[in-house]
Structure formats: C-alpha cells, structure tokens
Image: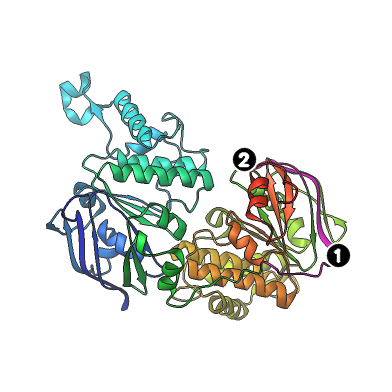
Amino acid sequence: MGAAPILRMRGISKSFHGTQVLHDVNLEIMPGEIHGIVGENGAGKSTLMNILFGMDVIHSTGGYEGSLEIAGKPVDIKSPLQAMEHGIGMVHQEFMLLPSYSVAENIKLNREVLKPNLVSRLFGSGLQSLDYERMYRDARRALGRLNVGIDEFAPIAGLPVGYMQFTEIARELDKENLRILVFDEPTAVLGESEAAHLLKAIQEIAAEGIAVLFITHRLSEIMEVCHNITVLRDGRVVATRKKNETNVLELAELMVGRSMQFNTNSKRQVQRGKPILEVKDFKVDMPGEQVRSVDLTVYQGEILGIGGLAGQGKIGIANGIMGLFPASGEVKINGEPLELNSSQAAIAAGLAFVSEDRRGVGLLLDASIELNIASGAMFGHGKFLKTWGPFSQTDRRAIRENALKYIKQLGVRCTGPTQKVRQLSGGNQQKVCIARALTMNPKILLVSEPTRGIDVGAKQVVLDLLRELNEELGMTIVVTSSELAELRSICSRIAIITDGQVAGILRPDDSDVNFGLLMAGQPIEKGA
C-alpha cells in the first residue's frame, strides 16, 4: 500500500429536509486497500457513497458539509461524470444495465469506441462509426480480469443475475484511470459460489493497487476480504477497526449499539401436529433452481427449514407451490389437493409467500408502503374493502392502521406509511414484503431468503418475529434460506436440497459434518 491515502473524507455531514443523516464523518483509504463499511439500514452508508460519487440526490437537496481529497488534492465532485474523471467507479446495489444491449455494449455504454468512415471523412467526426471489434476486445479484457466465462456478445436480457452483476463490475474495470472502486451490496443477489468468486475478484482488483470500498450486510464477507472496517450508526462513525483486531460479534454490537446474541434454539422441541402441507414427486421448472423430485411433509405448528447450495433447487420449491413457475406432482393442504400452477388457488388455500425476489415479485415499487402491505389481503381475500351491493371502496383508515402496526413492529425506517416503496432501502423493502404476507393471516407462511440484503440488527428482528408468530400464534412456517446458521436458530427440522431432491432432513443440533455431507450430496456416515 502507498504511504498516503488515495481518499480522504473529512467532516462529512448531510441533511435531507431537516433530518440529519450524516454527522461529521471522517474516512481514509489507501491505494490497494479493501475498506469495509458496515451499519444498519439507514446508518448513512449509501448517502456517504452518493456524496463521493457526486449523485444528483445530494446536490439537488442542498449539498453537504465537509471536504474530499483524492491523492492529496481537494476535489469538489458534483456529478458522476466528475467522479469518473477523478478515477472513482461505483457498482450499485440495483443494476444499471440496458436489457436489449449486449454485455459488451453495456460495458462500453457512454464510452463507445469510434472509428472514421468515408462519410465522417467528408462531413466531420460526428458521423463516425462504432468500432465494434475494439469494443468487444475491451469488454473481453475486462471480463477476463474477473475470470468469468461470460460471452461478451450475449444480450443482457435473460442472463442469470450473477452474470449481470459481473457485467456491472467489468464496466467499471474497463474505465481508464480507475483508482477507487465502490461496491454497494454486490453479493446481495448472488448465490454462494458466485459470491465466493466475487470476493476473490475484489481481492485481485485491490492487488492491482485499486482502493476498494466494500459495503455489505454480510459480516463474514467483511472479515474475509477487508483490511480495515468502519462502522456507521445513526450517521456517525462509531469505530474503525483493523480486521485482525475485531470479530463478527463485535462488529454486530457496534452496528446496533447493543449486545447481539441470536437465540440458537438448537435443542428446540416442537410437538408435531398433523400434516398440513404434503409434497410428493414435486417437480418445478424454475431456471437455475430446478426441482427434480421432492417428497416433503410439513407438520402443523412447526418451522421447517429448507437449505442447500445455490442452484440445487431449494428456491424452486416455494415458487412452484405458489404457482410462479411450472410445476407437476402432488401438493396437499390439510389433506386436500392443491391446484398447481395457480397463484390464486394457493392464496385461497391459505398460503402466503415472501419471495426472494422482492423487487420483481413482492412489491409495487411506485405505490405507498401502506398499499403494498394491504395489497395481498385486499386482492386475495377481499380485506380492506367496504362493500355496498355491487359497489366497493377501499377502507383507507383500516389500511393506514394496519400499515402503522407493521411499521412499528418490524422497525421499517421510513418517513411514513404513504412513502413510496421504491424510496426505501433494500432491507426495509424486505420488511414491507413480510408485513404484506402477515397481513394475509396465512395458515402456512412460505418465506424465501427472509434476511437477504438486511443488516444484522434487522435480521434478528425478522428471525425473532418468525419465531414469535410460530410460538404465540401457532403459525406454520417454511423458511428457505442460504444462511444455514439462521435456519438452525429457528427451525425444528431442516431439509437439505441437493440436485433438486431432498438429500436428507436434519435436526438443528445435528453435527456440522452431517450438514456438510448432505449439502455435498454425500450420504451421512454412521455415527457422525
């Protein structure tokens, strides 16, 4: 690493409409350093990065206080274009890609390579042609730095989510004079293997001398790749630690300002009721998560976990039951056959679903929080409607009261129930999805990746809520998650899915060896 910081942020403060969101923040990063920034949703992480990248949301709301230095020189960055001119790149949490364009065209977007032609030689350089040969060569070089086998000619539309994320990163690496690269929740949409590949790529990028600012809710990733870590809470820096001087538990406690200890429940015993959900020879054609033949029984009043590696089919089970992807086989609810390939039938049978794809499936992004929370129950069960003969009208008062209840219960950080969901952070959007499902008062709650993109404090809130719903209301819950530790903390049984089938069902207090063997598709050794 160099002797002087490549970036200094001094005394950074920012208010939005009278609300202070950053308070005198100081941050330094050296060339080649991976610097982690962690904090709960609303701690100020994204606002700080928006200041660095010159986003319009900062300057259209009065700017900020404090100063920035790049390589020891004061800078005043008022647009992303100026940020790029200073060698700053940013990989945003939400993709900024054009679906109809190829991977290479997205990588070179707004930096297209031109070449002269006969017309431009006669009438001026404004009529030059795109130099596709060089553009595709540059794109291949940038993708090669990430060691990913993405076809630069492929259109973005239809690509797996992981490929889209690597295309975003390749676009930044292709820029000249890149000195600082910001990653904002880059692994939130990735599976385990893709996330591991990305972390390795981040380390290789830093090894080239590029400074990396890494924002993530996954503290294990922070501990794996970062040299130093800054913790934000309520817009203030509460600590900066070297990686070898801290641990995940301390970082979590610094983030939330209280002692953190997830309830392990490893010996949780649940008295089984009768079978409430039975799945036999169940197949689901979900791209990337195909279910080949699953037999599974869920008992009334339990929390069943579904785990496994990415791409093995665990995500497809709930999506197939809810009729979101083509399914075949047999599904019974309380002994009665469920009509497959029909979301309406699933809802009528008392199922509610929190999707892993909150933006694509779970939310009306341009609608209010209160309408999002009420919409499932309104259209699925006719709740929140006042009816006079053939006429009906929404019960706005009931919708508002319901929203306020869940905003308080789940700790949704917002300006109020009328705020648009699009304006919320990813973690708070997920809380709205959960509130929407709970408002439907389901017999069975299917939850996929409930803590994806949520900070550690909010994770505990969500997990405790699921446990409370189960213990106090007797709600049957099926939780699908990539976070095995979380499944073991709340579930009475955990089904491991491998190659689209149930490899085995374990208790939460079974050995790590048994979980590892099943996830690897190996039989459990006797006595293990």
In the image, farthest residue toward the left: 73
Residue 102 in percent (x, y) is at 42, 33
Residue 256 picture location, percent across and down: 44, 74
- Count residues near mark 1 (Cα–Cα under 10 Å), then give few for <14, some for 14-19, many for 20+: few
- Mark 1–mark 2 Cα distance, whole angstroms, equals 33 Å
| Element at label 1 | loop
Query: Left or right of 131: which side holds 157?
Result: right
Q: Which residues fall within the magenta stretch?
A: 266-294
| Residue 298: percent from left, percent from top | 78, 59
Residue that protrudes farthest toward the right in the picture: 335
**Count of numbered circles in the view:** 2
Nearer the observer, 5 or 515: 515
Mark toward the start of the polypeptide (1 vs 2): 1
Picture layout, residue 256 above or below residue 524: below
Do we see residue 388 in this rendering? no
Q: Which mark is residue 287?
A: 2
Q: Please tell me whether residue 368 is drawn above or below residue 120 in the rendered image.
A: below
